[in-house]
Amino acid sequence: MRQQTHFPKHYRTLREIDVKRIVMARFNSLTDCSTIHSSLPEISRRHRIPLSTCFYAIKAFQERGLAYVNKRLTNTRPPHTFKIKDAVLGYLKSHETLRNRND
């Protein structure tokens, strides 16, 4: 089964309390997701949000271990790294380069 890494924009704008309200409306619990309490169309109408947003909010909440994770804080991108090649590193550390720098 392939995991989806992209969620619609509507889901990304939800706050933690919004996600918890949707999950509580669906399952009547934040820890036990085995019994469905309300249907998705009913929750969508009650909270005035798109049906797909309800679906993805619940799906992401379950995939992340029944926890809200704000992906906007890290923007889901790995930190940038800058690697210096061995040849460039050798040139920068050489005595000749350092001597020329001081002149």
Image (spheres, grey):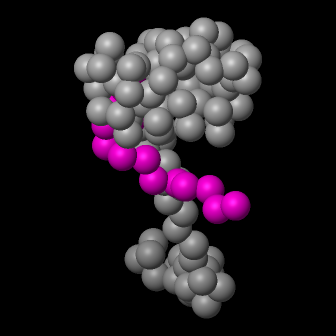
Query: Residue at the spot x=70%, y=61% of the render?
Result: 1
Left or right of 62, for residue 49: left
User: Is the stretch drawn in magenta largely helix, strand or loop?
Assistant: loop
Query: Residue at the spot x=56%, y=25% of the render?
Result: 68
The percent coordinates of residue 44 (x first, y second) are 34, 24
Tell me if residue 54 comes above or below residue 37 in the rendering: below
Q: Residue furthest left?
A: 48
Residue in the foreground of this view, choosing between 39 and 23: 39
- Bounds of the magenta segment: 1-16
Instruction: Kindly indicate the quadrant of the structure image that contains residue 83.
Output: bottom right
Query: Residue at the spot x=62%, y=20% of the render?
Result: 36
Left or right of 31, for residue 53: left
Q: Is residue 5 magenta?
A: yes
Tell me if residue 59 comes above or below residue 27 in the rendering: below
Query: Residue at the spot x=30%, y=20% of the render?
Result: 45
Q: Is residue 49 magenta?
A: no
Tell me if residue 6 comes above or below residue 98 in the rendering: above
